């Protein structure tokens, strides 16, 4: 069955779901987005994702022509139309169609697009073996250029880093900021464990403040770990006992090699595995507020 895609209030079969070549989202990467997941009919952290979407839009002076509740309902409408329980939800707001030229004022109507599809996870084996990552020469965007806190439609900075890591035979890239501090990977935040402490780059190190990152910080605190958000260097990565990446798509992926140095024992560490287990429990937990919102809106109608 063809997927249905939400565009500005309409649900269209995927082959008819098209937007203008004059959309500034395409012409200039002018727009914002979110990547969200649902597990067993429950949308994980939907409120947090919608809040971040509005913050990203505010930062680029884009007024979303719907309120948060309407967006929330539109997400569930799209999920129901596609009858998907485990899905990847791509919520996109572009500046809209306009004449050529950078001025956002040329675009009168932002486009709201919701795609719900299935998502290809990393092979389960990678979660057992861990991945290898490398630091790359491409520097993460400076916060006064395009602040990485804005989840905008221009991912060229990250794509260049991804190409570099793949060219060097690694699975993922670690990007540093202009001052040389560790920022993040191309679509994941990075964590290390050292001496029973969990460390992750400070929110102003040049990162997207990941929602999975926030969840993991909370889980770690519940486990009694000290969590510190700091400015980290490559040295900190090299001497770490454990390392892992977090993101909506990747969830929690163990890292076992960084720039050719083996992390800890060379196998995913015990704290990483414990966090992964707790994360997997949480995303399916009916007690989570997201689940209640979901049920109220009728996504899991009998
Ligand atoms: N950093 C960057 C640059 C990201 O794009 C994260 C960190 C992790 O954030 P969350 O909130 O997901 O924990 C992201 C998220 C995709 C895709 O389609 C990308 C992300 C999330 C979901 C899907 O490639 N990036």
Image (spheres, grey):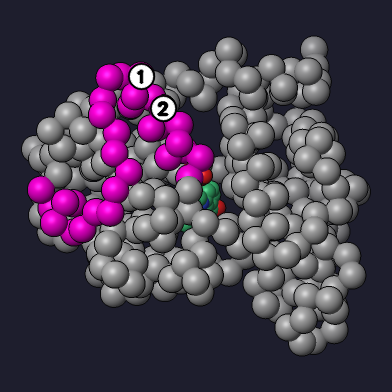
Q: Tell me which residue sits at (12%, 33%) in the image.
A: 195
Q: Tell me which residue sits at (45%, 31%) in the image.
A: 215
Q: Secondary structure at mark 2?
A: helix
Q: Find residue 183 and report its image quarter.
A: bottom left
**Is 234 displayed left or right of 161 in the figure?**
left
Q: Which residue is mark 1?
A: 222
- Asked if labels 2 and 1 touch by Cβ distance under 8 angstroms, the answer is yes
Quarter of the picture holding the N terminus: top right
Q: Secondary structure at mark 1?
A: helix
Residue 290, visible in the rendered structure: yes
16 or 296, nearer to the observer: 296
Magenta segment includes 221 = yes
* Category of crowding for the residue at label 2, using alpha-carbon neighbours closer than 10 angstroms: few (below 14), some (14–19), many (at least 20): few
Q: Tell me which residue sits at (43%, 71%) in the image.
A: 142
Residue 81 position, x and y percent, is 82, 35
Q: Is residue 233 above or below residue 48?
A: below
Q: Tell me which residue sits at (29%, 70%) in the image.
A: 179
Q: CA distance from mark 1 to mark 2?
A: 6 Å
- Residue 218 is labelled as 2
Magenta-colored span = 210-239
Magenta segment includes 135 = no
Farthest residue toward the bottom? 101
**Is 214 displayed left or right of 49 in the figure?**
left
Q: Is residue 209 above or below residue 32?
A: above
Residue 187 position, x and y percent, is 45, 54
């Amino acid at each position: 069955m063809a997927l249905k895609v939400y565009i500005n209030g309409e649900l269209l079969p995927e082959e008819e779901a098209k937007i203008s070549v004059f959309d500034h989202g395409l012409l200039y990467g002018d727009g914002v987005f979110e990547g969200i997941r649902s597990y067993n009919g429950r949308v994980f952290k939907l409120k947090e994702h919608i809040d971040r979407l509005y913050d990203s839009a505010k930062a680029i002076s884009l007024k979303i022509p719907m309120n948060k509740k309407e967006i929330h309902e539109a997400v569930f409408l799209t999920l129901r139309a596609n009858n998907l329980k485990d899905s990847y939800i791509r919520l996109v707001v572009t500046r809209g169609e306009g004449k050529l030229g950078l001025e956002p004022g040329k675009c009168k109507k932002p486009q709201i697009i919701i795609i719900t599809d299935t998502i290809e996870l990393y092979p389960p084996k990678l979660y057992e073996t861990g991945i290898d990552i490398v630091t790359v020469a491409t520097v993460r965007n400076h916060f006064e250029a395009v602040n990485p806190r804005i989840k905008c439609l221009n991912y060229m900075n990250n794509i260049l880093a991804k190409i570099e890591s793949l060219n060097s035979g690694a699975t993922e890239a670690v990007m540093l900021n202009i001052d040389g501090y560790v920022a993040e990977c191309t679509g994941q935040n990075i964590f290390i464990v050292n001496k029973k402490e969990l460390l992750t780059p400070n929110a102003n190190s040049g990162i997207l403040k990941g929602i999975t990152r926030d969840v993991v910080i909370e889980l770690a605190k519940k486990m009694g770990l000290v969590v510190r958000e700091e400015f980290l260097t490559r040295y900190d990565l090299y001497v770490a006992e454990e390392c892992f990446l977090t993101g909506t798509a990747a969830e929690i992926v163990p890292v076992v090699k960084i720039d050719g140095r083996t992390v800890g024992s060379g196998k995913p560490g015990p704290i990483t595995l414990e966090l992964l287990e707790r994360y997997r429990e949480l995303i399916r937990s009916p007690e989570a507020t997201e689940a209640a919102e979901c049920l109220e809106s009728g996504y899991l109608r009998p």
